[in-house]
Image (cartoon, rainbow, N blue to C red):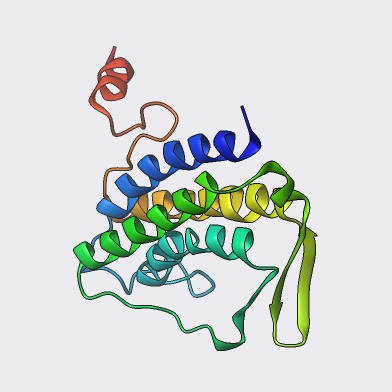
């Protein structure tokens, strides 16, 4: 199996889980944050969705420059989920058209003249497009727990799933 196909399979599996998390975002609590150093729930949810856009940037460009970045805001959950779905389709498309050698090229993340890093694309997709994404999805889970919202299953049942609750009562 090619690296691109392997990553596509992993992306689809993680996207399925991530979408369930975004479906749980309470739009009446977007201004919630657990403390003053943490991101607001609304901004975190958008960030979890927008990270999908990094796949296209990574695989079709040599860098991502945040100098003109403007955070998106959504009035409804449906808009957020539509944005997520659109970016997922773009990511799937670029992966379906990628060749393994494409992942050896270097890619940079920058803010104007400040270069944060330059790494091989295969490292960028693992570290930033996947691991970074999963990290922020997990943050959503801690926010949900603090707010009394059920945390979706990730790699197995969560403590909120009926079978786990039943087992814990035995």
Residue drawn at the location 55% of the way across and 88% of the way down: 68
Q: Number of marks in the image?
A: 0
Q: Where residue 123 appears, x then y in whole percent? A: 73, 50
Residue drawn at the location 33% of the way across and 78% of the way down: 73
- Quick check: 55 above or below 5? below
Locate residue 10 relative to residue 49 in the image: left or right: right
- Quick check: 50 above or below 152? below
Nearer to the camera, 53 or 37: 53
Residue drawn at the location 49% of the way across and 75% of the way down: 36
- Quick check: 129 above or below 157? below
Nearer to the camera, 167 or 66: 66
Rendered image quadrant of residue 140 = bottom left
Q: Where residue 63 appears, x then y in whole percent? A: 68, 71
Locate residue 34 relative to residue 30 in the image: left or right: right
Locate residue 42 relative to residue 129 in the image: left or right: left
Rendered image quadrant of residue 109 = bottom right
Q: Where residue 102 appears, x then y in whole percent? A: 70, 51
Nearer to the camera, 103 or 18: 103
**Image quadrant where one finds the N terminus:** top right
**Image quadrant where one finds the C terminus:** top left
Q: Where residue 55 appears, x then y in whole percent? A: 55, 57
Rendered image quadrant of residue 150 = top left
């Amino acid at each position: 199996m090619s690296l691109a196909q392997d990553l596509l399979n992993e992306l689809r599996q993680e996207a399925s889980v991530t979408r369930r998390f975004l479906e749980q975002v309470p739009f009446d609590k977007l201004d919630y944050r657990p403390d003053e150093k943490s991101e607001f729930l609304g901004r975190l949810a958008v960030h979890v969705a927008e990270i999908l856009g990094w796949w296209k940037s990574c695989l079709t460009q040599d860098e991502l420059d945040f100098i003109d970045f403007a955070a998106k805001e959504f009035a409804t959950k449906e808009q957020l989920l539509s944005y997520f779905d659109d970016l997922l389709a773009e990511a799937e498309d670029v992966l379906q058209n990628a060749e393994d050698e494409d992942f050896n090229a270097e890619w940079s993340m920058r803010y104007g003249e400040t270069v944060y890093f330059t790494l091989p694309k295969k490292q960028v997709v693992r570290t930033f497009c996947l691991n970074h994404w999963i990290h922020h999805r997990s943050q959503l889970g801690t926010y949900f727990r603090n707010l009394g919202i059920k945390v979706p299953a990730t790699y197995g049942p969560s403590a909120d799933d009926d079978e786990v609750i039943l087992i814990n009562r035995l």
